[in-house]
């Protein structure tokens, strides 16, 4: 499904799309024929890189700076997209922040506020705005985390911040399903080249750990593994799949 019901190219918003998983998703959606709004809050140069990658593939993209840890920033992003394209067909709530290898006993109030502002509050209101504004038959996706599948040392705060949006995916799917809108989550494991693992490719301990724990290929996840799952969920093949969570982990339970 590369066009909307009106025959126009679909419009997709990807939050946190300047690097890593977000960039891979944005480029994939552009390759599928979507007009992509590349959201970023930090590096304008990296966001421009994502836009260029989409355009070099023959797609259409535009970058928009907005802090999606705030409701005002989320509203700016959705209003900008409607003003530019007049519709929204796909929303991928990808923006997030990580703190790992941190015992619960060491977490600070500042750590809590930082993670919950983006991972929980930002995700909640991005999904809410998507539910209000996405066109009938649209697709809403939240990029979660395998940390929400079970407890693990050092990820107590991070995993906690990912639990509330996971629940909301299931509720929102029930509330907007009558319009043919699907709501799902994709929950990646450790992804090389993204987040805190951006520079992990040269870390032999990191590679050895993944060889030992990932049955499929003996490697960490890659951004395109997540983009593959996004491609499925935005396609007609997933038109009757909603309120679900897909663990992308190379066969590992977490």
Image (tube, rainbow, N blue to C red):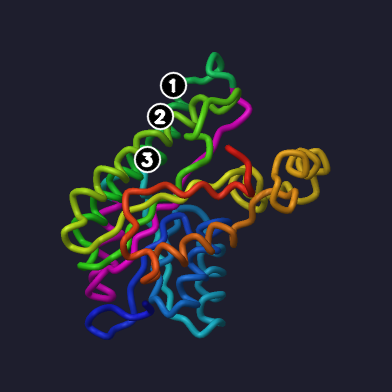
Q: Are marks 3 and 1 in contact (CB under 8 Å)?
A: no
Badges 2 and 3: C-beta atoms under 8 Å apart?
no
Comparing 13 with 76, the one in front is: 13
Q: Is residue 99 magenta?
A: yes
Q: Is residue 153 above or below residue 81?
A: above
Secondary structure state at the residue bearing disc 1? helix
Q: Residues within 10 Å of mark 1 (few under 14, many from 20)?
A: few
User: In the depicted view, which residue is nearer to us: 27 or 147?
Assistant: 147
Q: Position of residue 108 (x, y in %)?
A: 49, 20
Quadrant for residue 212, please give it: top right
Q: Earlier in the sequence, mark 2 or mark 3?
A: 2
- Give the extent of the magenta segment: 73-102
Label 2 secondary element: helix
Q: Which residue lies under the disc numbered 1?
A: 109
Quadrant position of the N terminus in the picture? bottom left
Quadrant placement of the C terminus: top right
Task: Report the residue at 53% width, 64% height from top.
Answer: 228
Residues at discs 1 and 2 in contact (Cβ within 8 Å): yes
Q: Which residue is mark 3?
A: 166
Q: Is residue 35 above or below residue 19?
A: below
Q: Is residue 122 magenta?
A: no
Location of mark 2 (residue) = 113
* Within-10-Å neighbours for mark 3: few <14, some 14–19, many 20+: many
What residue is shown at x 52% (from left), y 35% (from top)? 147
């Amino acid at each position: 499904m590369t066009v909307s019901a009106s025959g126009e190219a679909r419009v997709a918003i990807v939050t946190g799309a300047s690097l890593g998983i977000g960039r891979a998703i944005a480029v994939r959606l552009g390759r599928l024929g979507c007009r992509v709004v590349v959201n970023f809050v930090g590096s304008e140069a990296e966001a421009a890189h994502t836009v260029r990658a989409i355009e070099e593939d023959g797609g259409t993209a535009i970058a928009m700076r907005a802090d999606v840890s705030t409701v005002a920033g989320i509203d700016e992003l959705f209003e900008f997209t409607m003003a530019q394209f007049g519709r929204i067909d796909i929303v991928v709530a990808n923006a997030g922040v990580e703190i790992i290898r941190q015992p619960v006993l060491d977490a600070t109030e500042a750590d809590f506020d930082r993670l919950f502002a983006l991972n929980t509050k930002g995700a909640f209101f991005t999904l809410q705005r998507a539910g209000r504004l996405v066109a009938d038959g649209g697709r809403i996706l939240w990029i979660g985390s395998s940390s929400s599948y079970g407890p693990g040392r050092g990820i107590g705060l991070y995993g906690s911040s990912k639990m509330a949006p996971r629940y909301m995916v299931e509720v929102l799917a029930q509330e907007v399903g009558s319009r043919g809108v699907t709501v799902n989550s994709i929950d990646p494991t450790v992804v090389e080249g993204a987040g805190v693992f951006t520079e992990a490719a040269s870390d032999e301990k990191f590679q050895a750990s993944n060889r030992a724990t990932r049955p499929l290929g003996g490697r960490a996840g890659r951004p395109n593994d997540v983009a593959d799952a996004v491609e499925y969920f935005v396609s007609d093949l997933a038109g009757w799949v909603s309120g679900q969570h897909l663990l992308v982990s190379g066969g590992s339970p977490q």
